[in-house]
Image: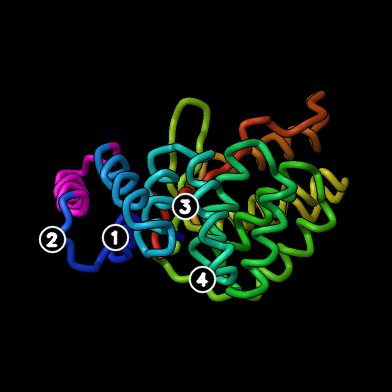
């Protein structure tokens, strides 16, 4: 997924003669994303939409949390470059953040079919699980299980008020287990929670879910797993 380094790489063409691009480059060097966005808006309004800086504008808006604007620019640029994976990803993430999971699922289904990326598989599973498309989530999980995972494939997740970090494959196993649990396949769910913890014994979400599942088996009166299962893999934080 997209990183700050990719923003800089996308904006590689020389900016020696244009005042707006000089401002953009200066803002990027100082980490001032808001000013960089302003500079690129001036540049694109002056030069037109058909250039690489419109792509960069979409990336910057997404990284700054301007998901409606990121969607606007990604969608506009996809009209000219319909198969651009970075733009598709920006559009999919933006739809998710704007509470349009069905549209985001359509995008990530297309992306995963093209890239076979573990990150795209994870995001697709997360979206499918989020709206209880459980059979689809399990199908994606089975495909994800066949992919290659490297030790530096990492993700962040929220646990209460805290943020944790774990292996991407552990996150895939955790969502796989949640879908199995919701389909009343508790024994299989337990196996996948344990697989997640075998990869990372400190993975707080999987640990909490496994403990809750064991409590259910012991007749402790609980009927659902804890609600704090939503995991995040942010393009700004993700490691390729």
Q: Residue 107 falls in which quadrant of the image?
A: bottom right
Within 10 Å of the Cα at label 4, are there few (<14), some (14-19), or many (20+) other Cα atoms? Answer: some
Q: Against 39, is 87 above or below?
A: below
Q: Is residue 101 left or right of residue 223?
A: left
Quadrant of the image for the C terminus? bottom left
Looking at marks 4 and 1 on the same chain, the residue that comes earlier in the sequence is marked by 1
The verdict on residue 112 being magenta is: no
| Residue 149 numbered tag | 4
Q: Residues within 10 Å of mark 1 (few under 14, many from 20)?
A: few
Q: For mark 1, what is the residue?
A: 5
Q: Are marks 4 and 1 in contact (CB under 8 Å)?
A: no
- The furthest residue to the left: 16
Q: CA distance from mark 4 to mark 2?
A: 44 Å
Q: Which residue is mark 2?
A: 17
Q: Rounded to the nearest whole Å, what is the CA distance between mark 4 and mark 1? A: 22 Å
Viewer-side residue, 100 vs 49: 49
Residue 91 x/y as whole percent: 57, 52
Q: Main secondary structure of the magenta part?
A: helix
Residue appearing at x 42%, y 67% in the figure: 151
Identify the coloring.
rainbow
């Amino acid at each position: 997924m997209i990183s700050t380094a990719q923003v800089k790489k996308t904006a590689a063409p020389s900016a020696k003669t244009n005042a707006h691009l000089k401002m953009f480059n200066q803002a990027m060097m100082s980490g001032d994303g808001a000013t960089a966005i302003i500079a690129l808006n001036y540049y694109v309004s002056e030069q037109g939409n058909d250039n690489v800086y419109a792509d960069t504008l979409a990336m910057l808006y997404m990284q700054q949390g301007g998901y409606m604007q990121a969607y606007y620019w990604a969608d506009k640029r996809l009209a000219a470059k319909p198969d651009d994976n970075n733009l598709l990803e920006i559009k999919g993430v933006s739809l998710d953040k704007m509470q349009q999971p069905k549209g985001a699922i359509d995008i990530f289904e297309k992306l995963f079919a093209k890239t076979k990326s573990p990150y795209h598989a994870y995001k697709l599973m997360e979206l499918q699980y989020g709206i209880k498309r459980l059979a689809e989530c399990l199908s994606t999980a089975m495909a994800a299980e066949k992919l290659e995972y490297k030790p530096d494939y990492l993700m962040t997740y929220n646990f209460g008020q805290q943020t944790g970090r774990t292996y991407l494959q552990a996150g895939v196993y955790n969502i796989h287990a949640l879908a199995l649990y919701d389909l009343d396949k508790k024994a299989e769910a337990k196996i996948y929670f344990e697989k997640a913890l075998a990869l990372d014994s400190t993975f707080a979400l999987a640990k909490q879910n496994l403990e809750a599942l064991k409590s259910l088996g012991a007749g402790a009166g609980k009927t659902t797993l804890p609600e704090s299962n939503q995991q995040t893999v942010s393009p700004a934080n993700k490691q390729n």
